[in-house]
Amino acid sequence: MNAMNRGFLLSALMGISLLGIVGLAAGEVKLSKGQTMYIPSYSNIISESYRIVLRANLIIHNSAPNHSINLIRIDHYDTEGKLVGKYLSEPMKLGPLAAHRVIIKKPERGDEGAGSNFIVQWQAEQPVTEPIIECVMIGASGTQGYSFSSQGRVISEDKE
């Protein structure tokens, strides 16, 4: 076997091994009765010569196939940690496999800053699979469009 074939074989085996490891981690299901989650959001991207203003879309997916969850709080903070928006005036029920989207107004100059974020709190009557919470940011400069997403992270778990 020549060096090129050995390199290819080694790369393929490493890839298969990584898929196995990722598959085990991804297959692990965690149940919870409630959490508070932090979701990064970016209202602008700055390079040396220009700034691209982004619009954030917060999307909350109830991944539980048979149970509803209650959204308790959806708050938006700027880079300094100052509250800039509350998106729930009262708890909201999100049915099984349903999703809810919050579209943030397009900031004029990206005023919320590069380090803005959301805090989302949810609860359920019985343990359910964790919801998937993402922020999708989109923007454009001339004819070039930009989009990317960030995922939420648990910052506190409700105790039973």
Image (cartoon, rainbow, N blue to C red):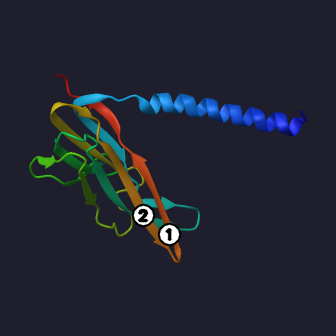
Q: What element carries label 2?
A: strand
Cα distance between the residues tagged 2 and 1: 8 Å
Q: Mark 1 points at which residue?
A: 145
Residue with the most extreme bottom position: 142
The disc label shown at residue 138, or none:
2
User: For residue 158, which quarter of the picture?
Assistant: top left
Residue 70 x, y percent position in the rendering: 15, 42
Crowd band around label 2 with a 10 angstrom C-alpha radius: few (<14), some (14–19), many (20+) = many
For image coordinates 32% across by 41% down, the residue present is 38
Tell whether label 1 touches label 2 (CB within 8 Å): yes
For image coordinates 36% across by 49% down, the residue present is 134
Q: Can residue 43 be seen at all in this image of the molecule?
A: no
Which quarter of the rendered picture does the C terminus lie within?
top left
Residue 91 vertical placement versus 156 (above, below): below
Residue nearest the viewer, comparing 158 with 95: 95
Q: Is residue 85 left or right of residue 151?
A: left
